[in-house]
């Protein structure tokens, strides 16, 4: 893999390994000479498993993106946002613009729910498995703004890519406040169909320098 490209899910996987080692150390200290048995019989805390699940989602989406990478489509994984501890899962540079992709491994069906509209202000919400997850859209919008501020007038598109969600057989993808909400294959199809006049190589070089690999 090109070192500049980064590793999909790299920082999430590293955090999972760090937490797992810390959990194991705590169990061994607590149980002494029975520590090995206690580790084998103990379940990982949900807070630790979440990092493994997140890394797996990023890795799956990243593999699909790597499969379409070419001179016309460049991919950067796991990029640190300057001045913060936050990272961007994937940046995809196409002739039509820059895609900021946030991978999520969630169960349940993603849906666009609209409330109000006549007597009350219209409000659009992202609901996944019946739970309000609109904050995920807020996060992508913020990431898009960080990239847009450094993208030299290149169009920037945000996307939430849900892995293992309960998508319907027909339709299902939608746009919420300009953020595309979709699944891995749908994302790949949209990226592959992108057209425009963006200088992909030059834009990739700029982004790789400004958004360094998180690991």
Image: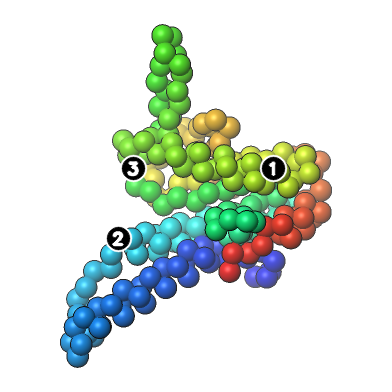
Of residues 169 and 84, the one drawn nearer to the viewer in this rendering: 84
Disc nearer the start of the sequence (1/3): 3
- Give the left or right position of residue 54, taking residue 131 as reference: right
Location of residue 33 by image quarter: bottom left
Q: CA distance from mark 3 to mark 2?
A: 18 Å
User: Residue 148 has which mark?
Assistant: 1
Observer able to see residue 69: no
Q: What x and y, as percent, mark residue 72?
A: 75, 51
Which quarter of the rendered picture does the N terminus lie within? bottom right
Query: How far is mark 1 from mark 3, CA to CA?
Result: 31 Å
Comparing marks 3 and 2, which lies closer to the viewer?
A: 2
Residue holding disc 3: 108
Left or right for 45, reference 162: left
Q: Dot 1 lies on which element?
A: helix
Q: Which residue is mark 2?
A: 46
The residue at 72%/39% (across/down) is 155
The answer, for residue 57, to whether it is visible in the render is yes
Observer-nearest of 202 and 139: 139
Rendered location of residue 11, percent (x, y): 52, 65
């Amino acid at each position: 893999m090109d070192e500049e490209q980064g590793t999909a899910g790299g920082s999430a996987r590293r955090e999972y390994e760090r937490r797992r080692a810390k959990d194991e150390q705590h169990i061994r200290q607590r149980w002494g000479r029975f520590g090995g048995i206690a580790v084998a019989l103990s379940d990982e805390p949900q807070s630790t498993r979440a990092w493994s699940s997140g890394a797996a989602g990023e890795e799956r989406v990243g593999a699909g993106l790597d499969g379409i990478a070419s001179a016309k489509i460049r991919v950067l994984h796991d990029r640190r946002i300057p001045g913060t501890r936050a990272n961007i899962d994937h940046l995809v540079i196409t002739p039509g613009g820059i895609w900021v992709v946030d991978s999520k491994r969630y169960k349940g069906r993603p849906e666009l729910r609209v409330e109000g509209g006549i007597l009350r202000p219209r409000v659009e919400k992202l609901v996944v498995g019946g739970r309000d997850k609109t904050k995920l859209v807020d996060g992508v919008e913020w990431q898009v703004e960080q990239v847009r501020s450094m993208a030299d007038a290149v169009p920037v598109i945000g996307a939430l890519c849900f892995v293992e969600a309960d998508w319907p057989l027909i339709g299902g993808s939608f746009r919420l406040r300009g953020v595309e909400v979709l699944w891995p294959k749908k994302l790949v199809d949209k990226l592959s169909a992108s057209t425009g006049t963006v200088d992909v190589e030059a834009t990739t070089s700029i982004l790789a320098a400004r958004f360094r690999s998180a690991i």
